Image (spheres, rainbow, N blue to C red):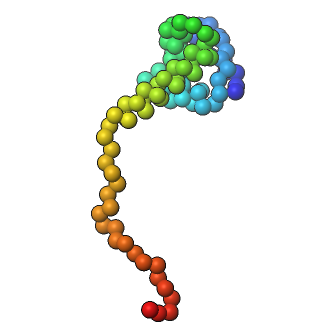
Amino acid sequence: MKKRSIVIADHKTSVSLEDGFWKGLKEIASERDATPSELVASIDADRQLGNLSSAIRLFVLDHYRSRTDATADVPRRAPSRKGRQATRPHRAGGA
């Protein structure tokens, strides 16, 4: 876990986040054409309880959970077996 400095509304603060959550936060910000600071400011404004680090973790977790839930609703096709032939092991020397 690393402590990271971030500026929210011209106020410098720090959050303690694991690398995976920080990477997720940056990916989400990029998808939304925002900076990590802008995204954290939004998370901070919407936060009801708890500290900012926890709110960020919950936000990132919820983001990826909702993505997983959305893709779980999409029917998946079984892999095609077309073009595959059963093969026997090759035996050297005969029969």
Residue 60: x and y, percent? 52, 24
Quadrant (top left, top right, bottom left, bottom right) of the C terminus: bottom left
Quadrant in the picture for the N terminus: top right
Q: Is residue 19 left or right of residue 90?
A: right
Q: Residue at x 43, y 23 (%)?
A: 32
Residue at the image position 49 percent from the left and 85 percent from the top: 91
Residue 29 in view, yes or no: no
| In-front residue for pair 93/44 | 93
Residue 58 sits above or below residue 49 on the image: below
Q: For this rendering, which residue is in front, 36 or 1?
A: 1
Q: Would you place residue 63 above or below residue 55 in this image?
A: below
What residue appears at the point 34 percent right and 67 percent down from the top-left corner? 84
Q: Position of residue 87 (x, y in %)?
A: 40, 75
Q: Can residue 18 be seen by looking at this rendering? A: yes
Q: Is residue 92 toward the left or the right of residue 17 in the image? A: left
The answer to which quarter of the image holds residue 33 is top left
Q: Please state which of residues 49 and 4 is positioned toward the viewer in this rendering.
A: 49
From the viewer's perspective, is residue 34 above or below residue 84?
Answer: above
Does 66 sit left or right of 12 as displayed?
left
Check the image and report above or below for 80 versus 40.
below
Which residue is farthest bottom? 94
Question: Camera-side residue: 60 or 25?
Answer: 60
Residue 55, x across and y down, in percent: 57, 15
Residue shown at the point (65%, 17%) measured from the top left = 15
Figure label count: 0
